[in-house]
Image: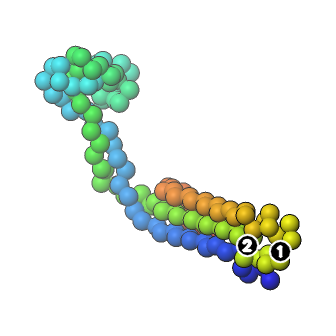
Amino acid sequence: MFDKLINGNIYYQAASERSAKLERVFIRVPLGTGSYSYQGDLNKNGIADESEYILDPYDGEYIQTTLPTDELFPVIDLKINTRWRIEFDEYFKQTNWISTALNAISTETTYRVEENSKIIDTKKYIFLT
């Protein structure tokens, strides 16, 4: 009876993979050609930390780039997509004023989720618990 009224589909895909962590690196360039300036070792740890670089578009002598590290981390790639369509004209074939009004109405709803996550417990993530 209602098999023609509502139709739709559900798409679900989950995959686990390993991905390298990206690390920000600052590279020295000629003065005035960079976007960042180094403020010195502010926390006295002997390492140039990311927080010690400030944005300086005019007198900068460092540019920022990202490099992958050697260490790989587990990553879950999840994709969910659903589409539902309701068409009243497929259900109401009578010719009274209610069916005439409802036959002019149809609706379609689409919902899509794509996510990459580093959650350790993959079962909870894949089964959406």
> How many neighbours does mark 1 have within 10 angstroms: few (below 14), some (14-19), or many (20 or more)?
few
Residue 89 - label:
2
The amino acid pointed to by label 2 is Asp
N-term mark: 2 or 1? 2
Horizontally, is 92 left or right of 34 in the view? right
Q: Is residue 44 above or below residue 70?
A: above
10 vs 77, nearest the viewer: 10
Horizontally, is 48 left or right of 80 in the view? left
94 vs 63, nearest the viewer: 94
Q: How is the image coloured?
A: rainbow
Q: Is residue 124 something one can see in this rendering?
A: no
Total label count? Answer: 2
Horizontally, is 25 left or right of 5 in the view? left
Residue 69: image x %, image y %? 31, 50
Residue ID at (21%, 25%): 34
Residue 1 - label:
none
State the image quarter where residue 31 is shown.
top left
The amino acid pointed to by label 1 is Thr
Image quadrant in which the N terminus is located: bottom right
Q: Which residue is mark 1?
A: 95
Furthest toward the left, the residue is 30
| Alpha-carbon span between mark 2 and mark 1 | 11 Å
Residue 51: image x %, image y %? 38, 26
Image quadrant in which the C terminus is located: bottom right
Residue ID at (57%, 59%): 112
- Helix or strand or loop: what does disc 2 sit on? helix
Residue ID at (28%, 24%): 36
> How many neighbours does mark 2 have within 10 angstroms: few (below 14), some (14-19), or many (20 or more)?
some
